[in-house]
Structures are given as structure tokens and as C-alpha cells.
Image: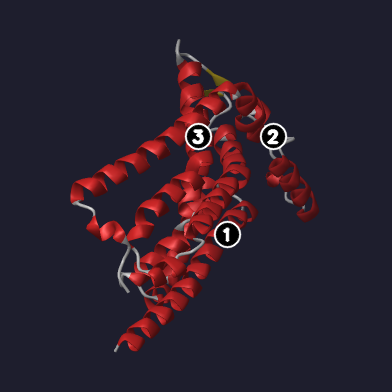
Amino acid sequence: MAKNTSEEMSFLEHLEELRWHIVRSAAAIVVFAVIAFIFSRFIFDFLLLAPKNPDFITNRLLCKFGEYMNVTTLCINSSSAFIIQNIQMAGQFKADIMVSLIVGIIIAFPYIMWEVWRFIAPALYEKERKAAQGSVWAVSALFLLGAAFGYFVIVPLSIDFLGGYSTSVQISNQIALDSYFSTVAYVPLATGVVFELPLLLIFLTKVGVVTPDVLKKYRKHAFIILLILAAVITPPDIFSQILVVLPLVALYEASILLTKRTARKHQQIIDNEK
């Protein structure tokens, strides 16, 4: 089956088409960033500063779980452990711009993926387009799920551990504004990208870079890396580490199952073409 009319476009026409997809994606980010900037007071008070307070939903649930398990280290009391200070004239303004931009990227991500799909789809065969149908929703859902996991799990645990960590009672923690908001804003963005692991491995399987057997072979190595990652970003207790590492392990196991299915379908297509 012939591909779409995109084959008739010249290289410069492809670049022009790509440019407009990038322009529209950037415009979406700017629009949502401006909206976030307008509502920055709400974002700062009720979203970014919330994870440091004991009444944050994750902190309350962890504390209740800690009481049930008789583990007092799960109770978070970060609000009294450190203060956030601004020592630069334009510090709060720069933090506002940075946070608004990151919020704009997170909110605009589904639209950006739709623009990517609109650029790629015309170059695919009909069967490939049908096979990839719904991929935009899958990518967007995994990204937003990862961002939510970062915000509701990793961020409060990291704030509690790093904000309350002390080597001496003579040293008080006074966290710089940009340092705090960099952690709170960038972690959900990073975890959103990490949660794209299954789809990335599916793509690498289709192009022959990895196989399910390779993922199984290095499963133990991957688990060790995930445990080290969980130990770095969580307080030094086993329950917090388990809360973080379980979704990461589940993602890896899901990746193995999905790549196995992808490899099997890909082999069937090759056999049918022979």
C-alpha cells in the first residue's frame, strides 16, 4: 500500500511543515504558561508549597500508615524543619517565570504529542497508522500519571528528607527559593518522562535495538538501579523506598510484557511478508 501524499513533498516543504508544528506547540506552552503566571498565587500557595506541610494529603496518609505500622519516621513535619528565603532582588519573579513555564509544558504536553502525531502520521502506511492509533492518548496518560506520581509521592518524601536533614544542631536549614521550587517543579516533569519507559522500549523493540530476552536477562541489574534510585530520593526507611520503587518495578515488568507482545506481532508481520 502506498504511503500518503507526504512523499510528494520536498525536503524544504517538510521543514516548513515541521516548523509550523513546532510553532503551534510552542504557542500552546506559552498560552498555558501565561495562564499559570496569572494564577501564580494559587499555584504557589496551594500546589508548590503544599507538599512541605504536614496536612498535605500524601503526608497525612503516610502518617496514618506509619501509625498503623508503628513506624514514626513516616510522619512528615517539614513545615517546621526549614524556611524558604529569597536573597535576590528578582528571585521571586524568576521563580514565578520558571514555574509558569514548567506548568505550561506539563499542561500542553498532550497537545504537543498530538502535533508530533500530525507530523508523523502522513508518512505512515495505513496499517501502521491503525497500529499506532491511540498512541497520543497513551503517551499523554503515562506522562501525566508520572507527573502526578512525582508530585504526590517523590516530592513530599524528598522535601521531608532533604529539608529536615541535619549534620549538627548548630546548623539550621534555610532553603533558597530557587532551590526549593526547582525540586518541586522539575521532579514531576522528570518522573513524567520516566513513565514513558514502556513506550520507549516498545519503539526500540520495533526497530530491533532491544528484545524481551535482553530485558529479562538484565532484570536484576535494573532492579538494583531502581532500588538505588529509590534510596537516593526517599528518607532512609524501608517503607518510603518501597512506595517509590514498586511503581518503577511495575513499569519495567510492564515494559517486558509489552515488548514481548510487540516482538511477536512484528515477527508475524515478517512471516506474512515472506
Instruction: Give the class, few, some or many, for how many residues have Cα within 10 Å of label 3's Cα (few <14, many ≥20).
Output: many
Q: Which mark is residue 256?
A: none
Q: In this view, does 7 lie to the left or right of 235?
A: left
Q: Mark 1 or mark 2: which is in front?
A: 1
* Above or below 95: residue 103: below
Say what secondary structure mark 1 lies in: helix
Q: Earlier in the sequence, mark 3 or mark 1?
A: 3
* Above or below 168: residue 248: below
Task: Identify residue for label 2.
Answer: 77
Spatial CA distance of label 3 from label 1 is: 26 Å
Query: Which is more toward the observer, 172 or 234?
Result: 234
Q: Which of marks 2 and 3 is nearer the N terminus?
A: 2
Residue in view at x 48 percent, y 72 percent: 258
Q: Which amino acid does label 3 sit on?
A: Gly
Tell me residue 89's x, y (percent). 45, 10
Q: Which amino acid does label 1 sit on?
A: Pro
Quadrant holding the C terminus? bottom left
